[in-house]
Image (spheres, grey):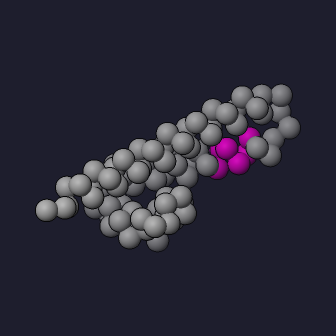
Amino acid sequence: MDHAVQAAIARFPDRGHAIEELARTNESFRSLCEDLTAAQAALLHWERSMSAVRGARCAEYRELVRDLAFEIEAELDRRKDTRQP
């Protein structure tokens, strides 16, 4: 399984199957997962940094991670809504 998909599943463990399925068929969704992984890595980097801009960068990346997680969740919800009778 792709590292980016694993990161999305870690964020939404109860929706793992849906994440795997959507990632297999939707390139845009896979890209969201990759963006989430990159943003989480950048956040971790800045959290460990001693730079003077650490606080500002952490805030920016926390917001980005939150926004990407929201987009992933919204995409999963849209997919769920289209599959219900």
Outermost residue on the right side: it is: 50
Magenta span covers which residues?
A: 41-46
Q: From what the image shows, is residue 19 above or below residue 42? A: below
Residue at position x 53%, y 58% from top? 11
Q: Position of residue 76 (x, y in %)?
A: 34, 55
Left or right of 45? Residue 62 is: left
Residue at position x 41%, y 51% from top? 73
Q: From what the image shows, is residue 22 above or below residue 33? A: below
Q: Position of residue 13 (x, y in %)?
A: 50, 66
Residue at position x 62%, y 38% from top? 61
Left or right of 65? Residue 57 is: right
- Judge whether residue 5 is colored magenta: no
Between 73 and 35, the one nearer to me in the picture: 73
Q: From what the image shows, is residue 50 above or below residue 79? A: above
Q: Can you see residue 3?
A: no
Left or right of 33? Residue 75 is: left
- The image shows a total of numbered marks equal to 0
Residue at position x 32%, y 61% from top? 22
Outermost residue on the front side: it is: 85
The quarter of the picture where residue 85 lies is bottom left
Classified by dominant secondary structure, the portion drawn in magenta counts as: helix
Left or right of 38? Residue 25 is: left
Q: Position of residue 53 (x, y in %)?
A: 77, 28
Q: Can you see residue 40?
A: yes
